[in-house]
Amino acid sequence: MDLDFEVVELGESDHPDVGETAPDFTRPLVNPEYWEDASLSAITAEGPTLLVFHPMDGAFPTTYIWNEIDERGFVDDVQVVGVSVSTPYAHEDLLDERAEGVRLFSDPAADLAETYGIENDLDGMTGVTEHRPAVFLLDDSRTVQYAWAAEEWPAFPDYDAVEAAIDDLV
């Protein structure tokens, strides 16, 4: 297959795995109407949560990820929250276009990429990092029930496996 882009090996990540507790954090959380600082622990206390790390809004992998999540209706079964380097303003646009029923954390400095062990240093550019695609299904105590992180760019989760993990949890 002739691709219009190069597949890049990212290597292994050091992300939280099944049975571990996902690190807590507080960041601006954007919904369709406003944003405010919120913690992951407050979100998961409301029930099972699918935590989706994605590249900046507007990137083709982000579009693909949210289209697939929308089509599968994950928000009907669990809370779905995303995380990227994009600003709250960019998140508002993404929420207008797709990701219905989702809330998005803004992490412009990509600090959570390091916290979660899912850094993607862009094209070898010093100091330019974003989150590699990653998905964590968390129960109400932030215990990881399903974990996946990309090992190449671009890569996408096995959505059937995510769906099965959601079905097992709920």
Image (tube, rainbow, N blue to C red):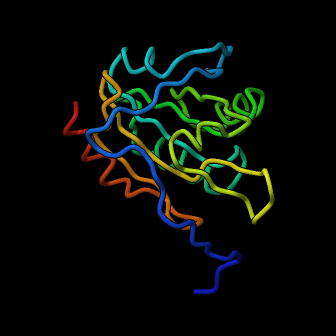
The residue at the far bottom in this view is: 1
Could you tell whether 166 is left or right of 14 in the image? left
**Residue found at x 46% / y 36%:** 51
The vertical placement of 143 against 18, above or below, is: above
**Residue found at x 69% / y 32%:** 91
Give residue 132's position: percent from left, percent from top.
Answer: 58, 53
**Residue found at x 57% / y 15%:** 38
The vertical placement of 5 against 88, above or below, is: below
Give residue 141's position: percent from left, percent from top.
Answer: 31, 22
Could you tell whether 165 is left or right of 118 in the image? left
Q: Of 111 and 107, which appears nearest the observer? A: 111
Instruction: For the N terminus, give its image quadrant.
Output: bottom right
The residue at the far left in this view is: 168
**Residue found at x 40% / y 38%:** 73
Instruction: For the C terminus, give its image quadrant.
Output: top left
The vertical placement of 138 against 121, above or below, is: above
